[in-house]
């Protein structure tokens, strides 16, 4: 009995398979038809809906409508389905092209016809009318997420920020995540945003090595992939926008079966890989400016929680011996933009630009670690000196107040080495009465009689007067030249101003060599040094004390055009950012070099 049932079912299955292929082949001769189907005909402005263009034949070329009054959030996503109704004996094969749209204005809007080419013949769909009403509330899903659908399955992209409000310079974490019901197979195109108004440091970025997790949202389970994580530090106050990102990915979707449970269980339900493009929406962050009350004079813009330590490797040295002074700023904040405190040194001690050593890690908790500034000090004269480090001030967002840190004062004992030439002070000779020593000279004759030179007389001759007048003339000439030279040396500001343009051009010439060799880091560093050195010597402000405010104020007071000042500040900003995240092309670097040279020439023309 059981054998007969199995045999009968086996015969029925073979008959079903025969009819499947027979009826599928017959659809090749069916009349082709392109139909537009919409999920909703009454929507609000910004509300998402789906339109599918379905054709019951093979397609050679599909061309979608322009969608002039709509935003295309997804599409076209193509899919193929084949169904057999064994009760009626009808086979249905369809190819569909699906878009996800949202209307950008209210009124009666029309979706124009789409077209396909089938066996050389162009077929168009009928236009579809959509009634769009005023949106009662902004369609802004969770924290910068954009939701789209494909084949009935929901997908969306979220831009998640760790906080919606923060202080200027305070860290926040941004995470770009994509959600899909279907398994994510890979990515074809990732379009990351440029974080305008923020200094950014990327933590994690997905290319093809996908780490999928699962999350449950509103009772639905999604596959989730983290596309990128980055730490952001807002550089200005106000409402800052994180631009949306988009991603084109491949997902594996489950197709439709034949309707026969025995057939589907034996052969399995087919799967297909579909290309899907998803675009997110922007996220906004409200940035509070730093308080102006009780701001320390030596505050340089650091925001976070820091500690300061300083040390020297020697406290007793000889002249011309090198001493290492280390300043370490550690803690949590934007350490890569921290400027070193100013060092107060006596004139007898020379120093050079510090070398910075970073021990910094970037993660989901922000930027942590330390930055050490190493100075080389060289005393030129013996003596006892004091070395003071100026206070380091920062704004602590947790305490909502400014904090000032002080380092101890260092005493330096410098001894003379054997090669040092000390200045010799000569005391005036003391006058004494002539004393008679012994009695070897008894008498000096005072009456010499008459004396007369024989021959030519030198006294009163032209040669005599020439040699007599030449030394005073040379002496007065020497005094005049010496006074002029001392006056020029005392005018330090004037001397620096004359050297400023030459120093800057030498720096830019060295930067140009790095540009030709493709060394981005060294190129931006030399351009920054050249511009800072030029401004420092021109306005007589140490490089360590330069800030955007005093640069603008000092150059404005000297009647430098505002456009030139903005150009110099823009060059400084670009170089500072590029030192830590160089991304410019050779063309951009060349333009940067030309802009720096042009800005210095224009400034020099104004100040000369």
Image (spheres, grey):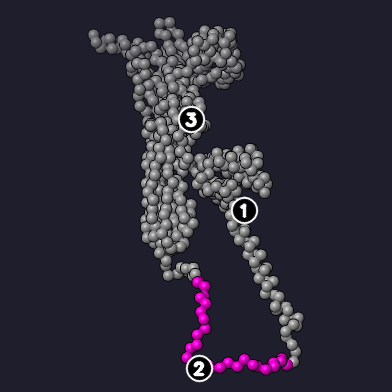
Question: Which of the image's four quarters has the N terminus?
Answer: top left
Position of 359 with respect to 516 (left or right) is left
Q: Which mark is residue 440?
A: 2
Considering only vertical position in the picture, is 3 above or below 74? above
Considering only vertical position in the picture, is 362 above or below 248? below
Task: Give the mark nearest the N terminus, 1 or 3.
Answer: 3
Callout 2 secondary element = loop
- Residue where numbered disc 1 is placed: 494
* Magenta range: 426-454
Residue 396 visible to an observer of this rendering: yes
Q: Residue at position x 44%, y 22% from top? A: 143
CA–CA distance in space, label 2 to label 1:
66 Å
Callout 1 secondary element = helix
- Residue where numbered disc 3 is placed: 289
Considering only vertical position in the picture, is 274 above or below 7? below
Callout 3 secondary element = loop
Q: Position of residue 487 (x, y in %)?
A: 62, 59
- Label 2 vs label 3, nearer the camera: 2
């Amino acid at each position: 009995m059981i054998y007969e049932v199995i045999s009968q079912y086996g015969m029925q299955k073979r008959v079903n398979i025969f009819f499947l292929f027979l009826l599928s082949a017959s659809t090749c001769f069916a009349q082709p038809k392109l139909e537009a189907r919409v999920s909703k005909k009454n929507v609000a402005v910004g509300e998402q809906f789906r339109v599918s263009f379905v054709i019951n034949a093979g397609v050679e070329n599909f061309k979608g409508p322009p969608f002039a009054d709509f935003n295309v959030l997804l599409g076209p996503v193509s899919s193929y389905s084949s169904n057999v109704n064994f009760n009626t004996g009808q086979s249905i094969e369809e190819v569909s092209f699906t878009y996800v749209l949202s209307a950008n204005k209210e009124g009666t809007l029309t979706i124009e016809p789409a077209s396909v080419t089938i066996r050389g013949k162009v077929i168009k769909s009928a236009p579809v009318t959509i009634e769009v009403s005023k949106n009662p509330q902004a369609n802004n899903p969770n924290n910068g997420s954009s939701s789209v659908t494909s084949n009935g399955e929901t997908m969306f992209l979220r831009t998640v920020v760790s906080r919606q409000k923060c202080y200027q310079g305070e860290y926040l974490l941004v995470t770009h995540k994509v959600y899909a019901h279907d398994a994510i197979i890979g990515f074809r195109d990732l379009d990351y945003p440029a974080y305008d108004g923020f200094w950014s440091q990327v933590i994690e970025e997905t290319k093809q090595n996908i780490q999928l997790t699962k999350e449950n949202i509103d009772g639905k389970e999604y596959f989730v992939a983290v596309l990128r994580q980055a730490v952001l530090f807002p550089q200005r106050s106000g409402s800052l926008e994180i631009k949306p990102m988009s991603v084109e990915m491949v997902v594996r979707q489950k197709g439709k079966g034949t309707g026969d449970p025995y057939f589907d269980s034996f052969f399995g339900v087919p799967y297909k890989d579909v290309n899907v493009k998803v675009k997110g929406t922007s996220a906004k962050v409200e940035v509070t400016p730093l308080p102006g009350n009780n701001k320390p004079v030596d505050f340089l813009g650091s925001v976070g929680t820091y500690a300061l330590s300083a040390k020297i490797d020697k406290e007793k040295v000889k002249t011309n011996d090198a001493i290492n002074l280390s300043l370490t700023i550690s803690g949590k904040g934007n350490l890569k933009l921290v400027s070193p405190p100013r060092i107060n040194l006596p004139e007898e001690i020379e120093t050079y630009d510090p070398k910075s050593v970073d021990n910094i890690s970037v993660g989901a908790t922000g930027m942590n670690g330390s930055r050490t500034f190493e100075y080389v000090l060289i005393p030129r004269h013996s003596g006892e000196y004091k070395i003071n480090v100026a206070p380091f001030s920062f704004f602590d967002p947790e305490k909502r107040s400014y904090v000032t840190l002080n380092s101890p004062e260092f005493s330096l004992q410098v001894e003379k080495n054997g090669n040092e030439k000390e200045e010799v002070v000569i005391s005036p000779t003391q006058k004494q009465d002539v004393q008679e020593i012994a009695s070897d000279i008894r008498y000096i004759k005072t009456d010499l009689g008459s004396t007369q030179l024989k021959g030519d007389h030198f006294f009163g001759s032209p040669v005599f007067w020439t040699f007599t007048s030449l030394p005073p003339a040379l002496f007065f000439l020497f005094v005049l030249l010496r006074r002029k030279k001392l006056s020029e040396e005392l005018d330090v500001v004037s001397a620096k101003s004359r050297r400023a343009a030459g120093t800057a051009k030498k720096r830019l010439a060295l930067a140009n060599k790095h540009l030709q060799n493709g060394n981005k880091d060294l190129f931006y560093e030399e351009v920054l040094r050249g511009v800072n050195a030029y401004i420092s010597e021109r306005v007589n402000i140490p490089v360590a004390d330069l800030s955007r405010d005093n640069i603008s104020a000092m150059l404005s007071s000297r009647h430098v055009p505002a456009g030139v000042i903005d150009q110099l500040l823009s060059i400084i900003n670009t170089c500072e950012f590029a030192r830590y995240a160089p991304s410019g092309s050779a063309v951009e670097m060349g333009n940067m070099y030309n802009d720096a040279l042009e800005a210095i020439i224009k400034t020099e023309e104004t100040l000369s």
